Structure formats: structure tokens, C-alpha cells
Image: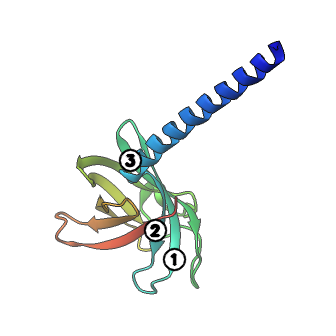
Amino acid sequence: MVIQFIVRSILALTMVLSATSAVAESARSRHIANSPEGLWRTIDDETNKVRSLIRVWQSNGVYYGRIVKIFKEPGDTGTCSKCPGRFKNKPILGLNIIWGLERTDGNVWSNGSILDPVTGKIYRVMLTLSKDGRSLKARGYIGFSLFGRTQNWYRVK
């Protein structure tokens, strides 16, 4: 009798914890789907091939991005040889290439910077998340966003 009570109590507790965990995970998934946080696949503008994976994260309302995987192409050196200042000759893998982004509108993050490790140039950046949260338009520009270029990134997870 006591053993049955303990078993039933443990089963009930397990079900409650599982449901709580599922609700928490669902809320986190919705939050991630409504932000640029996560892992993104970038596509090369010229070759149309997957070029890198970038992890975007948030700390105290500011968003950052780091290269976590590179899909090498001929001529890649693996170092940021054309990059300025603190980025000069650093390994591209693991390099923080986005910093200072803030949410400025419902699905837009801006006021940050992005480093192009191929050219070594730093641009202002604006990220616009699609309604379904599966793609991101990363627009690098100088001065006004009218003068720039946009890449489409695709959510990996």
C-alpha cells in the first residue's frame, strides 16, 4: 500500500516536471524564434555556397555574433589578414564579427557593427528577422542603410 502510494507520487511528480519542462522549452523556442539568437547558416554572395555558421547571442539587451564554423574555399587562409586593429591576423574561426546590436523595432536589430573577415572592412549592420523566424536579412552598410549590401542567413537551430 505504501509502496503503491510512493510509486504513484513519483509518477505524478515526473509528469508535472515533464509538463513544466515542455512549457519552459516551448516558451524559450518562441523567444528564440522572435529574436536573432541562435545558429545561422550564411551563403556566399558570389558562389551561392554555404560559407559559415554564425552563433548570435544576447547579453544585457545587446546582441553579438561569432563565427563557429567555416566551410573553406580555395584561397582561404583561416586568418583575418586584411582586418584592422584587434582583429588583425586573428583566426577567423571563433572571431566575434557582430557587436553592439540592439532591438530597434519589432523584428529589426541595428546600431551595431559587423566585420567582413574576407575584406577586413567594418560596416554598420541591421538584422531583420523574417516573420517565421527562419531567415535573417543581414545588411551591412556605410553611413545610411541605403548604401550597402544584404545577405540572407538561414536558421540552423
Q: Is residue 80 visible?
A: no
- Between 88 and 22, which is closer to the camera in this rendering? 22
Q: The residue tagged with tag 1: helix, strand or loop?
A: strand
Dot 3 or dot 2: first in sequence order is 3
Q: Are marks 1 and 2 in contact (CB under 8 Å)?
A: no
**Number of numbered labels in the structure image:** 3
Q: Which residue is mark 3?
A: 63
Dot 1 or dot 3: first in sequence order is 1
Dot 1 or dot 2: first in sequence order is 1
Q: Give how far across and how far down residue 76 sits, in percent.
A: 57, 78
Q: Which residue is mark 2?
A: 117
Q: Residue at x 61, y 35 (%)?
A: 18
Q: Give how far across and how far down residue 57 sits, in percent.
A: 45, 48
Q: Nearer the viewer, mark 3 or mark 2?
A: 3
Q: Amino acid at mark 3?
A: Tyr
Q: Which residue is mark 1?
A: 50
Q: Is residue 156 visible?
A: yes
What distance separates the C-alpha of mark 1 from that of mark 2?
A: 15 Å
Q: Are marks 3 and 2 in contact (CB under 8 Å)?
A: no
